[in-house]
Structure formats: structure tokens, C-alpha cells
Amino acid sequence: MTQLLPILFAAVVGFGHAFEADHLVAVSNIVTKRSKLKLAMRDGIYWGLGHTSTVLLIGIAMMVGKLMIDENIFRYLEAGVGVMLILIGLYRLLPLFKYKTENHHTHHVNDKNHHHVAYGIGAVHGLAGSGVMVLLVMTEVKETLPSLLYLLIFGLGSVVGMLVASGLFSLPFSKFFIKNRKVQLGLIVLSSILCLFFGSKIVYANIIG
């Protein structure tokens, strides 16, 4: 019974994990291209699936394959997340400085490619934080199968959490809620600046600091 408690708690932890600052600034920039709530929430699901897949892969490698990964590698992976956030921020910010502002066609992105981007961003986030997560689970849950089950439920919790987060962040970019294009552009600038800030902070903390 005592072994089941951390597993049952995993969904709650996973849900809360989706709301960490670096995750939120990344997803806020993803959904700025969405004008429909359904598509934004789908992006959140793909982010969660990408995050879950890499956490599970690292977990299987470390628990089943007995693979030992140097903690310094995860520091570089974490720095990679920072670089990714900087690139995301620049990608959304730089077009606004062109002679023509974004028009209505900005929102007509390729759904399949956009989901792939969301999945990739989630996978990078999962890869960076998986080492600490797996070691923590191995400390709390001694047996391999319950540990992997914990990671799976944690991942499903993060999928639900990011689904909710992406839905909430997409609301300001929905024409149903805010019809003023200048306000929407201002929110894009704000989310991009936050992405640049957190990305730079993560890189500094893991490489320079």
C-alpha cells in the first residue's frame, strides 16, 4: 500500500510539473500562432507526449539497462533547453520588426508540422529534466516496474497539465476573446521577451554560473 502512494501522487506531480516557468514560456510562444482553442490544446497534448516519451526512454535506460549517465550531461541538456527557448523567442519576435506586421495568414500554419514542433519542444524539456526525475523515483520507489509506472503516470499528468496550460495561454490570441490585433501583437512580444529572459537565465545557470 505504501508503494502505491507515490504512484497515485505521480499524476498530481506531473500536472504541476507542466506549469513550471520554462514550460509555460515555451508553450505560450507555441500557441501564439493559434486562433482556435482546440488546436492550441492539441499542441499541449503533443508537448506532453514528447516530454513523457523522453522521460520514459531515459527511465528505461537507467532502470532496466542499468545505464549510468553523468550528471554534467544533464547540465548541458538543461542549457540546451535555454538555447531552445532563446531560439523560440527570436523566432516569434523577429518577424514583428519587418516592414509588414503579421497578417491573418500567420495563423494558417501547417497543423502537422506545428504538432511536430510542439512534440519536439516537449521532448527536449523531458530529456533535460529526466535524469533528476528518474533518480528521485529510484530513491523513493525501489522496484523497477512500479518506478516505470510512476514515470508513466507522471507523464500522463504532465500531458493533462500542458493541455490545460496551452488552452489558457491561447485565450488571449483567440479572436473570440480579443479582437484587437495590436493587443495580440503586444502579448506576442511579451511572451517572446519572457522566453528570451528565461532561456538566457537557464544557459547562464548551467554553463557560466
Image (spheres, rainbow, N blue to C red):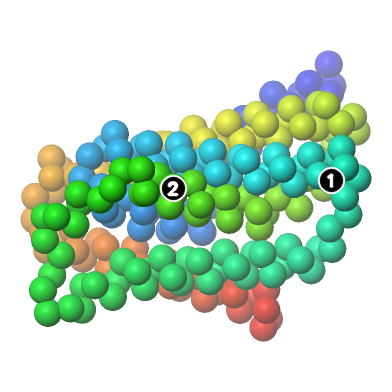
Mark 2 and mark 1 lie on one chain; the one further toward the N terminus is: 1
Q: Is residue 61 left or right of residue 201?
A: right
Vertical relation: 55 (above or below) 77: above
Q: Which mark is on residue 16?
A: none
Q: Position of residue 24 (x, y in %)?
A: 45, 53
Left or right: where does residue 62 sit relative to residue 125? right
Which of 69 and 204 lies nearest the eye of the viewer?
69
Report the front residue among 6 and 208. 208
- Tell me where residue 79 sits by quadrant: bottom right
Q: Secondary structure at mark 2?
A: helix
Residue beneath disc 2: 116
Q: Is residue 157 above or below residue 26?
A: above
Query: Viewed as shown, does residue 108 lie left or right of 157?
Result: left
The residue indicated by pointer 1 is: 62
Disc 2 crowd rating (10 Å Cα; few below 14, some 14-19, many 20+) is some
Q: Is residue 41 above or below residue 122?
A: above
Q: Secondary structure at mark 1?
A: helix
Q: Are marks 2 and 1 in contact (CB under 8 Å)?
A: no
Picture mark count? 2
Residue found at the far top of this picture? 1
- Where residue 18 appears, x then y in whole percent? 53, 44
Q: Residue at x 52, y 40 (%)?
A: 48
113 is higher (above) or lower (below) than 201: above
Q: Quadrant of residue 26?
A: bottom left
* Amino acid at the residue labelled 2: His
Give the foreground label among 2 and 1: 2
**Residue 46 seen from this side:** yes
51 to the left or right of 92: right
Question: Residue 141: x percent and y percent?
Answer: 85, 33
Which residue appears at 11% of the width and 55% of the height?
Answer: 104
Q: Quadrant of the N terminus?
A: top right
Task: Pick out the residue farthest to the bottom.
Answer: 208
